[in-house]
Structures are given as C-alpha cells and as structure tokens.
Image (tube, rainbow, N blue to C red):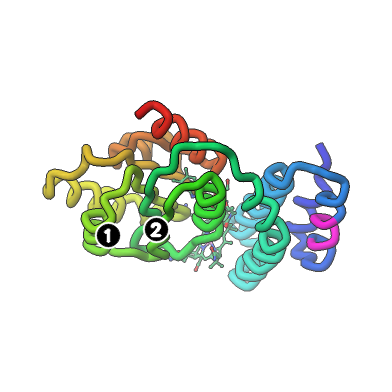
Amino acid sequence: MDEELSTKVVELKRDEVVELVRNKLDRGEDPLAILDECRKGMTIVGERFQAGDYYLAELMLSAEVFKSAVAILDPYLTNARSEGTPGRIVLGTPRGDIHDLGKNILATLLKAHGFEVHDIGVDVAPETILKEVKEKQPDFVGFSALITVAFDSMKETVDLFEQEGIRDKFKLMVGGGVTNNDVKAYIGADFQSTDATEGVAYCMEIMGGR
Ligand code: B12
C-alpha cells in the first residue's frame, strides 16, 4: 500500500499533505480511501504520543494537518451523494471528550446521503443529549468517543434514556478510535464501528428496512 500520505501526516508536513491529497484527487483516487490514509497517519501520531515521542503540541498540530486535508476532500465527500431514504440523527461527542474530527466526517457523509444531522458538538452532558433527543425525536443517536472517560458518560446518558422510557425509540450507534464490541455491550448500543462509511451503510440499511 502507498504509505506516503500517512507518513507525511505523521511527520506533520501540512503543505506536503495538502499537495499529495490534491494530486491523488487529480488522479481520480477515491476520496474515502484518501481520507482513510490520513486517518491511519493520525493513529500513528496517537501511538507516538502514547509512547512519549510526541507531545500535546504535536497532537494539536496533527489535528490542523488533518483538518487541512479534510477541507480539500470535503466537497468530494459531499458530492458522493447516493440514493437513500433520509433519516434523522442526533450526533455528538459525550461529556469529557473534545475530539471531533471523526464526528465531523460522519456528519458530512450522512448529510451527503440525505440524512438530517443534528450535530450537538463536543463534551456534551448526558442531560443535554437527553433534551436534544426528546426534542428532535431522531431515528439514530450517534456517540463519537475517542477517550476512555467518555465510556461512563455515554453509559450515564443511556441510563437516562432508559429512565425516561425512550431507549427503544431510536438506534444507538457508537464509534471513534477507542470503541470496540466491549464498549458497544457496556453502553448497550445497537451498532459500533471505527469507520464512518460503515456507520452510513448501517443507517441506510435500517432506513431501507423500514
Ligand atoms: C488529534 C487528536 C487530538 C486533538 C483533537 C482535535 C480535534 N478537534 O478533534 C487534541 C490535541 C485536541 C487532542 C486532545 C487530547 N487527546 Co487526543 N488524539 C488525537 C489523535 C492523534 C487523532 C484523533 C483523530 O481525530 N483521528 C482521526 C479521526 C478521523 O478518526 P476517528 O475519530 O477514529 O474517526 C473515524 C472513525 O472512528 C469513525 N467515527 C468517529 N466517530 C464515530 C461515531 C459513529 C457513530 C460512527 C459509526 C463512526 C465514527 O469515523 C471516522 C472516519 O472513519 C488520537 C489518536 C487516535 N488513535 O485516534 C489521540 C487520542 C484519542 N488522544 C488521546 C489523549 C490522551 C488526549 C488528551 C487527554 C491529551 C492531553 N494530555 O491533554 C486530550 C483529551 C482532551 C479531551 N478531554 O478530550 C488518547 C486517548 C487515550 C484513551 N484511551 O483515552 C489518544 C488515543 C492518543 C493516544 N494513543 O494516547 N487529541
């Protein structure tokens, strides 16, 4: 596999990342595949941070590099519109977590597929999520979680849904780098993925089946 782009992301070379992304688009490469290469770079940045080789400054810079790549890819992702039965989703990053790059990508892709997306932001308290869900009555609720402290706040939110008797009114999705099947089971989600396109496919399938 061509690792030049992910390597440049890891090296935090913004200009070179931008140039590579443009070149790849010009060559007709799939924007989603390009995005995935950038994301792989971000995973390695995270590993370096964990190992103490990168500091918070590098982590912050990596987010800026990634955003520059997404800014170029965004119109291509939005144009990837396909036929689907639209649904409504309330999407947010739960309390304790401020990561939003992945959430924003999922929001872009869902909108491109005709979904009504209510992005309620980052570090959102369980009570606020509950309020939004009661108000918007969505078909889906999506949590994007990148750090482990988010697990308990998601669980707290789901407990609130249950107390209010609304948990069965929508499908609950969870995604983001640190999520897996255990997290899915812990919060009682219906679907989990670390790939935004799989999230979109799930929403399309559910809406199509209705
Ligand atoms: C960039 C980054 C930051 C940036 C975030 C900028 C921003 N605007 O988001 C900044 C610098 C702010 C940051 C801060 C911190 N970070 Co940080 N960060 C990262 C890093 C390197 C990349 C994350 C990222 O954006 N990846 C790219 C996106 C596109 O990927 P993604 O989010 O996984 O999303 C994809 C899929 O998962 C999916 N998806 C996402 N959400 C959803 C939702 C649904 C429903 C579905 C279906 C799919 C889906 O769609 C996307 C595309 O496919 C990760 C490393 C990693 N392995 O992820 C660490 C990482 C997440 N950070 C970490 C840490 C520790 C921190 C800090 C605590 C550091 C500190 N000491 O202050 C703070 C936390 C602050 C807080 N309270 O949240 C740890 C978390 C460890 C843990 N297990 O808890 C990580 C894993 C690094 C590491 N290995 O140590 N960080």
Q: In this figure, what is the number of numbered marks?
A: 2
Name the chief secondary structure element in magenta. Answer: helix
Q: Is 207 covered by the magenta stretch?
A: no
SS assignment at label 1: helix
Crowd band around label 2 with a 10 angstrom C-alpha radius: few (<14), some (14–19), many (20+) = some
Instruction: Residue at 50% x, 53% y: name it.
Output: 107
Residue type, numbered disc 2:
His
Q: Residue at x 70, y 52 (%)?
A: 76
Magenta stretch in the rendered image: 18-22
Quadrant assignment, res 85: top left
Residue 54 at least partly seen: no
* Residue 29 relative to residue 144: left or right: right
SS label for mark 2? strand
Q: Quadrant of the N terminus?
A: top right
Q: Is the distance from the Cβ of mark 1 to the nearest ligand 1 atom less than 8 Å?
A: no
Q: Position of residue 60 (x, y in %)?
A: 61, 70
Query: In screen coordinates, is 148 left or right of 162?
Result: right
Residue at 77% across / 61% down in the picture?
Answer: 11
Above or below 95: residue 191: above
Check the image and report above or below for 167 versus 47: above
Evaluate if marks 2 and 1 touch, with contact meaning CB atoms under 8 Å apart.
Answer: yes
**What residue is pinned by disc 1?**
132
Mark 2 sits on what residue?
118
Tell me the residue at 49%/61% (across/down): 99
Pinpoint residue 28: horizontal percent, then vertical percent. 83, 44
The single residue placed furthest to the top in the displayed view is 209
Identify whether 84 is placed above or below 147: above
Task: Look at the image and tell me in which quarter the C terminus lies.
Answer: top left
Q: Is residue 87 visible?
A: yes
